[in-house]
Image: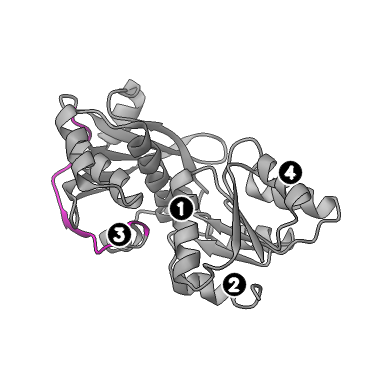
Amino acid sequence: MKILIADDSRVMRQIVIRTLRQAGYGGHDLIEAENGAVALELVHTQSPDLVLSDWNMPEMNGIDLLRALRASGQQVPFGFVTSEGTPEMVDRAMSSGALFLIAKPFTADSFRDQLDAVVA
Amino acid sequence: MSTDLDLVRSPSALEVRELLSGLLGRDVSLEPAEGFSGDSAAGSTFAVYVDDRLTTRAVAVVDLPLSAYAGAAVGLLPAGGAQDAVAERDLTPILKENLAEVLNVMAALLNEEGRPHVKLADVHHVGAWPSPQVCADAAATGRRLDLSVTIPLYGAGRLSIVGVR
């Protein structure tokens, strides 16, 4: 399957990719976006099967990306990977249509806990 | 009437160690240290955390060596490059970018339900001394955590996290 990773930090995208491999998801097609606006375009042009997105990003943040996707009828599975981990932020994420929120810093186990149900 | 809950939370040394160890992928060790508010001779990194009204709520200060080592370790870059940066008192763009992400993730240490929500707003890197207000915030007494941090295979340096307003 195709997984889109949206994060404005290049090193964090590398860490997410590394952790996906450590968690056993290395064989998937991974594409990257440096902000929400690029991610929104890539969802429409590349049709990923899962989006893993940071929350705080320039141009378009993660929650606005999620809301824009859902407003356009796009139902791609969507999870946050973010330093925003308070229950209030988790509630905002879920009520906007996210499947999960993985808080940074994360481990391969925290990826498996959330992704096993989504990634075939 | 203001209460303690009007302030960002004060992280513990254990939480800092766990966050850095997880993020850098190696067992970081740390010890309590004397108050550190920046080294104007060598240069330091200042991170400014603001609430949703853009009011500064916390400042983190990282000395030159730890700036270089953390920026290198998070990206699995060679220790030699970080040591060169310390010797030259300047960080490469990739070290700065990587360090900024470490400081961004550290915002998680300051957030807790029921308290003001903060996020990283600005990073003043080595070579760009911040405004007098940021310097004053970094020197504030009271709610601060001053640490000596050692990153295995890289080296040690100073980190202070200061809660303000």
Label 4 or label 2, whichever comes before in sequence order: 4
**Does label 2 lie on the same chain as label 4?**
yes
| Residue B159 is one of the magenta-drawn residues | no
**Structural distance between the alpha carbons of marks 1 and 3:** 28 Å
Q: What secondary structure characterizes most of the magenta part?
A: loop
The chain to which mark 1 is attached is: A
User: Would residue B36 be visible to someone looking at this image?
Assistant: no
The chain to which mark 3 is attached is: B
Residue nearest the observer in this picture, A83 or A47: A47
Q: Horizontally, is B30 left or right of A10 in the view?
A: left
Q: Which residue is mark 3?
A: B12
In this picture, is A20 found above or below A54?
Answer: below
Q: Which residue is mark 4?
A: A41
Task: Check residue A115 in the rendering and tell me which mark sits there, or answer none.
Answer: 2
**Three-letter residue code for mark 4:** Glu
Q: Are marks 3 and 2 in contact (CB under 8 Å)?
A: no
User: Would residue B19 be visible to someone looking at this image?
Assistant: yes
Name the residue rendered at 86%, 55% in the picture: A73
**Does label 3 lie on the same chain as label 1?**
no
Q: Horizontally, is B16 left or right of A2 in the view?
A: left
In this picture, is A63 found above or below B141?
Answer: below
**Structural distance between the alpha carbons of marks 2 and 1:** 18 Å
The nearer-to-camera label among 1 and 3 is 1
